[in-house]
Image (cartoon, rainbow, N blue to C red):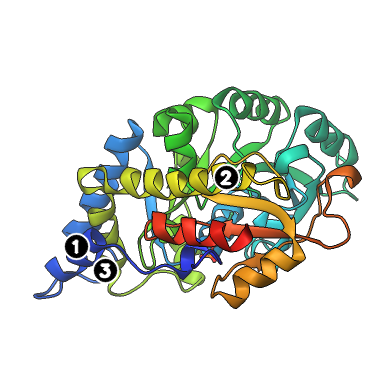
Amino acid sequence: MYFASDNWAGASEPIMNALMRHKDGYEPAYGDGPICESIEQRFQEIFETDCSVFVVGTGTAANALALSALTGPAGTVFCHKEAHIRVDECGAPEFLTSGARMWGLEGRHGKLSREALQTGFQEVPHGVVHHGQPSAVSLTQATEVGTLYSVEEITQLSAQAKDNGLAVHMDGARFANALVTLGVTPAEMTWKAGVDVLSFGATKNGAWCAEAVVFFNKDYAKDFIYRRKRAGQLFSKMRFAAAQFEGYFENDHWLDNARHSNAMAARLVKGLEAMDHTRIAWPTGSNEVFAIVPKQAAQKATAAGAVFYDWPSFGLAPEECPGEGESLLRLVCSFSTTQAEVDQFLDCLK
Ligand SMILES: Cc1ncc(COP(=O)(O)O)c(C=O)c1O
């Protein structure tokens, strides 16, 4: 019963098979060979546009490097208060952008609202040397609390960002999970909605170490090869990082994985909602479920071998927070979560 994180899961078979296919022989190093080229073409087909693609090893590197391409000196990036770039990346975005500020904004359900963004623009206006330069807005899709922006919301926020001269970044560590729930195309959820640069995650969805920075607006990509190299993210055997995407995209494997993990999350939600003493903290749009359960029940599940994290209730209204004797749990499903695991966990909570 592993619900700690989707990156506790292993790597899925098509991805490992793709790695095995490329294990022999020789190929130019540092991404100059045919695999990396064909992967970029694959991204272009999937996103239906002439994007530039740079494979990196971690989501933190993807985000921090993507943002470094969007910020000038003394930049400010507007994001949700709980955004991974602001809270969980150990200052990597600040470091790789040479000190841009990650300006956290309030927002219900882990999402930026137009009002919050407007507040941010007022707090850090253009042209005040002391405040620095507003440079980008970063949205996380799916969000840190498992909710989703609709395409319309992304389009509106992007338009607002553009009206204020800012670039738009999307942290897509769980891009596939959001995509299959919304039932839209990758293009509709990104560049057609105004996203300039995407951190495209695959690791949490079955790869073992594969993320990509995808530039829809190629103007921002012009120095990126140097940024990636300087950050130590240009792997000499880049073909193995890239080969994972070969397996990932084959026969829509990435979408199948995401559908499976989302379905397991939906099963959890259904079971939790059927119990009187549990409730869901944020609407579940992806593979992450946040549930408020009695502490005793959580302890019983732990004793039975369930693994999950207790989660802080930042962002919940006071009346929504866990009460005395309750805990907020984060339960993350992955491509390898089984129905039996979900049902066993639910039984523990009964
Ligand atoms: C929303 C989000 N963005 C980015 C990351 C960063 O990924 P990594 O741990 O590979 O650096 C994570 C990882 O948990 C995440 O949840």
For mark 3, give the secondary structure: helix
Front tag of 3 and 2: 2
Q: Nearer the viewer, residue 223 or 340?
A: 340
Tell whether circle 2 marks a residue whose Cβ is less than 8 angstroms from ligand 1.
no
In which quadrant is the C terminus drawn?
A: bottom right
Label 2 near label 1: C-beta < 8 Å? no
What residue sits 39% from the left and 69% below the top?
234
Taking the spot 54% from the left edge, 35% from the top edge, the residue there is 195
Q: CA distance from mark 3 to mark 1?
A: 9 Å
Say whether residue 89 is left or right of residue 285. right
Q: Mark 3 or mark 1, which is nearer to you?
A: 1
Residue contact between numbered discs 3 and 2, judged by CB atoms under 8 Å: no
Above-or-below relation of 345 to 189: below
Q: Earlier in the sequence, mark 3 or mark 2?
A: 3
144 sits to left or right of 78: left
- For the residue marked with disc 1, what is the amino acid? Ala
> Which residue does the numbered mark 3 point to in the structure image?
240
* Residue under label 2: 269
Crowding at dot 1, Cα within 10 Å, few <14 / some 14-19 / many 20+, comes out as some
**Residue 151 falls in image quadrant:** top right
Instruction: Say which of 80 and 53 sits in front.
Output: 80
Q: CA distance from mark 3 to mark 2?
A: 37 Å
Secondary element at tag 2? helix
Q: CA distance from mark 1 to mark 2?
A: 34 Å
Q: In the image, 89: left or right of 171?
A: right
Task: Kindly indicate the quadrant of the structure image that contains residue 97.
Answer: bottom right
Q: Label 3 amino acid? A: Phe
**Residue 25 drawn at (x, y percent):** 8, 75
Secondary structure of residue under mark 1: helix
Residue to which mark 1 is pinned: 18
